[in-house]
Amino acid sequence: MSGSAIQARCLCKRFGSVRAACGVHLDVAPSTFLALLGASGCGKTTVLRMLAGFVRPDGGSISIGGQTVVDDTTWTPPEKRRIGMVFQEYALFPHMSVADNIGYGIRPDQDRARRVAEMLDLVGLQTQRDRHPHELSGGQQQRVALARALAPEPAAILLDEPFSNLDAALRVRVRSDVRDILRHTGVTAIFVTHDQEEALSLADQVAVMMNGRIVQTGPPHEVYRAPADRAVAAFIGDANFLAGTAEGRKVHCELGELIAEQDHHGPVEVMFRPEDLLIIPFGEHRTATVTDLQFFGHDQLIHLRLPSGATLRSRLLGAPGAYQRGQQVSVRVNNPAVIFPS
Amino acid sequence: MATPGLSADATPEHPELRRRAPIGLRLFAGAIGLAVLLPLVYLLIRAGETGHRFWDIAGRDETLHVLWNSAVLTLLVTASSTVIGVVLAWLTVRTDLPGRTTWAVITCLPLVLPSYVGAFALIGAFSSNGLLAPLFALFGLDRPPRLYGLPGAWLTLTLFSYPYVMLTVRSGLRSLDPALADAARSLGHPPWRIARDITWPHLKPSVQAGSLLVALYTLSDFGAVSMLQFNSFTRAIFVYYRTSFDRSAPAVLALMLVALTLLILWIESRTRGSAKLYRAGVGAPRPAPRVPLRLWRFPALLACTVITLLGLVLPLAVIAFWLLQGWTAGEPLWRGWSMVVHSVQAGLWAAGITVAAALPVAWLAVRFPGRTARLTEKAAYAGHALPSIMIALSLVFWAARYAPALYQSFALLIFAYACRFLPEALGSVRAALGTVSPRLEEAGRNLGRGPWSVLASITLPLLRPGLLTGFALVFLTTMKELPLTLLLAPTGFDTLATRIWSATEDALYAQAAAPALVLVAVSGIFVGVILNQEEQDDVYE
Amino acid sequence: MKRAASRPWLPALLAVAGLSVFAAIGMKADDGRLVVYCGRGEELIRPLIERFEQETGIDVSIRYAGTSELAATLMEEGANSPADVFFAQDAGALGALHRHNALTPLPADLLERVPARFRSPDGTWVGVSGRARVLVYNPERIAETDLPPTLDALTDPSWKGRIGWAPENASFQSFVTALRIQRGDAATLAWLKGIQANKPRPFAKNSAIVAAVAAGEIDAGLVNHYYLYGARRTNPDISARNHYFPEPGAGSLVNVAGVGILKTSRHRAEAERFIRYLLDHRAQTYFANETAEYPLIAEVSLPADLKPLETIATPDLDLNRLEDLEGTLSLIRQAGIF
């Protein structure tokens, strides 16, 4: 696959008895923005640091722009990989000005002043060029870190939890700023996050990582709609699970007969998203009981309990009706459900 | 801005901190560790010669008695030096004390006075017709209190060793991130809680580094205790050399001193804790605002003045008095500038090489904590409480036997200084390195710079406070070092310290006076330059 | 940025350091020189050396340090010692090197210049100047008639808190060793304990004792005779005098500073010439005049106020027997002195 900007094969890394990464495969097409999504401790940062060259894999290979940087016989140190990195804590050099930080990685044979000016332009910090990092706001520091990583025109850039240090209000704006900048430059980028909303909303591709493995890679909607297994389904977005039995594309469960996405025969677990669970207040079989309500303005989340004791959640847009705790309602699943053989 | 936390690397996200250090670094640090072990191996060889007498020598009542004396003295001196050093460091770094920089230079100068000169001067000042007699007469005492024994040794060693703490804590305070304290204050904590919960944990490594140096220096000192007639362990070691020309029995005692040092190191490492102290939050630390002292500046100035009077002005006055006496008696007072050149030359080289050697050891200890790092660091400190004469003799032993071409060469002399003073540089470099996040180095690598380029452009500039402090400490203590210089320097390599020694040895105090004053002046100039560099680091614009 | 401009001193500093190392490397003693390890004061010895170099054309490299430190250094250097001559402050250090088999016998004509009791019977070292034990006292506080006639008088309780001594000092140790030879260990221990009961003030240096006596801090102290003369240089009217115990014995022991040639010496002829020079009339007169030490060769005149060597009630004992310092130390320890 020479078309990949970044390719990893069978990456493995152990720290003592802890298996941080195991058999990690990754293909990132040029100009793609890939999110490496996983819970804290799943090994995603280790993968990122192996790509950057700060951690040496125990096995496997990595190639960047078609060139192998690590395999059993090759080792390219970080400075030779042409990979930019934005650190979680930004790691701006405190003793250098903004311009010096950005100019640090530019090769001597390039026109440093021009490139620094370009980068300052790109991130909108022209007026701050002579400031020191400690004089900037969090969002500005983030942009300096990005400009610094982009300045040497790297083959790809890596971002480690880039938005986790920003407060909520700032985060939304900085996210879209960062995505615009990356789109504008057309650089291949991988960012690590534990926030599935962040991954789904920003990335072109999402790679979900669990226990040191990449369990699924695909466009955000695909990962969301068709999770590879129950764990991915539970991790990405909100999910309702019910036990059932499949017969071809039909599946029987406590809610009656549902349409499944896939063909299967035998016992399965049925998964459907809360937004696919419709509530019919005065339907025929009012078997579900409202146990709790969370109102968010643009939508609301309704917690339900079935006679068997199973709990479900339904997400309703806006405020179509005022439900009350204890109210008996009937429910219906709107779209084909996902089934996982159990 | 988000609240910066204490540690990023405690989480399993970064378990690679437990990775092994590069082989080159381990070899380099290991070689330094072996070099500093030379004196200990020598001691083992010599102590082994005592055979069955070993335990007899070690277990004597007198031996245990002087060991106890030394332990008590060390405890007292360390405690008082730490208090004085921390207060002075805070006053000169974090407050608007008038003349801060000048005070900083002045108050670290007592370190350069050989302890026997300082003790001699203090004895003179405290004698019944000494400089201080009129002062005590004001309080109705017909003579100043006797300075001899434990109180005298305590006072003197405190006055001449608190600068160890002051210098290391100064650099610790400079690398302390004020945002931490601000964050705590914004959470509504009163100042004392901030001091206890935020400032202290970050300052602790540098306070400990300084206190450790004071403790080991107190154990190793011979000049002051012998002048002040305090029966310390070091004095017992010297008695053997002086009287029986026996090299084995003192080696036994020296090994006990090493054991005591290891005990102190163990206690120190127990209390050091394992928290990573570099910033885990965003961005870079900004320089701290200075605390306005307002009316408190008068007691602060008074404290600085009293310390300076006792530790510097009094000895200098006594020395100036000798000079005057010699002048009126028409004695030759000055023997040319070669000794000044030699002293400065030895001081600069020793400081440079020692700091350079401390860097890889500190690096290993901070970035790759593990067995190699622990052993190397312990080895560097283990011999630091030994009296210099033993280090000197051990290097005589090794060099004369196995490197005769180097014996009594300048290179060997610098090597000897580096062995002796490595811990002084190690403590402050280590403390400084602990506050530099490894992410910064990774960022540099990632931007296409090789490890050496990153070292030069990122790490070293950020380590400057620690490197400068280590440099200053080694420079000052090399300037006064005696036994190593006497026995290992090239023939004819006289320094200010050797000149002062040979003149006082012959009781020709007038002739010791001019070199002593020049020693203080030259050291003052160099320390001034060094501390001035520190000061400029604060001005980012 | 200010930083680059703020350290113009750095290149200059590096240049100085770089140049200086060349100068310093060149300072290693070269082979053609006579190397002397000298435990005696530089101020005293330097003029002698300069004159020796002028007269003989022999270049001398001299290393000054404490006698015991140099003795230990010579032992550690062993076969690779660069030293030719050891000039020691006291006979004990020379004796120790002799026992260590580091010294080589001197020619008879050199040895015979000095009375037999001031040199090694094996001929490996020879005394250069003599130093007598005395009691230095403050005449304003002790009348001449109240001076102790014997060492033992000092154990009288009337001396409580009035005496100073320097028990770490080699000359004191030699004196105690002499006392042991003269009286035996039991009597010596009794004497040490007697003095210790009077709580004498311990000093690090003999010169400090003289200063303390003159300042009235103590009334008397056990020292070598010449420290008084040293103190008189800066203060001719110093309030202190020497008292020689009239009782014959260790209290008036005369010890020597002496020289020996090392077995490893590669410049024997020059080394012997150096010793011959130290034992000639001029050098001996120099010692007598400069330090008020006793010249050891015949027919050298003494400074007027120095009690002649022959009239001192010195014990009749061989200085080589002052070697058993281990035993002496053990007695001093038993007496609780350290």
Image (cartoon, rainbow, N blue to C red):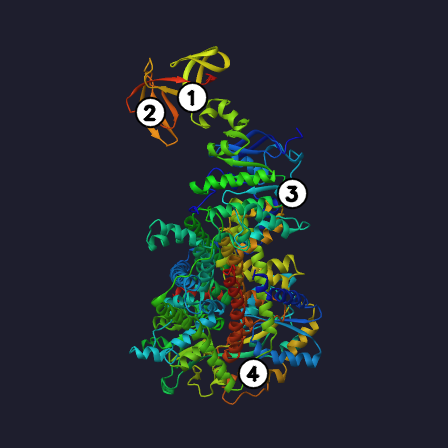
Of badges 2 and 4, the one in the foreground is: 2
* C25 lies left or right of B45: right
> Is residue A159 shown above or below B520?
above
Question: Do we see residue C113 in this rendering?
Answer: no
Neighbours of disc 3 within 10 Å: few (<14), some (14-19), many (20+):
some
Amino acid carrying mark 1 in the image: Asp
Residue C151 coordinates in the image, percent (x, y): 40, 77
Residue A171 coordinates in the image, percent (x, y): 46, 40
Helix, strand or loop at label 1? It is: helix
Say which residue label 2 marks.
A321
Amino acid carrying mark 3 in the image: Lys
Say which residue label 4 marks.
B332
- Residue found farthest to the bottom: C304
* A228 lies left or right of C146: right
Alpha carbon of mark 1 to alpha carbon of mark 4: how far? 103 Å
Between B482 and A92, the one nearer to me in the picture: A92
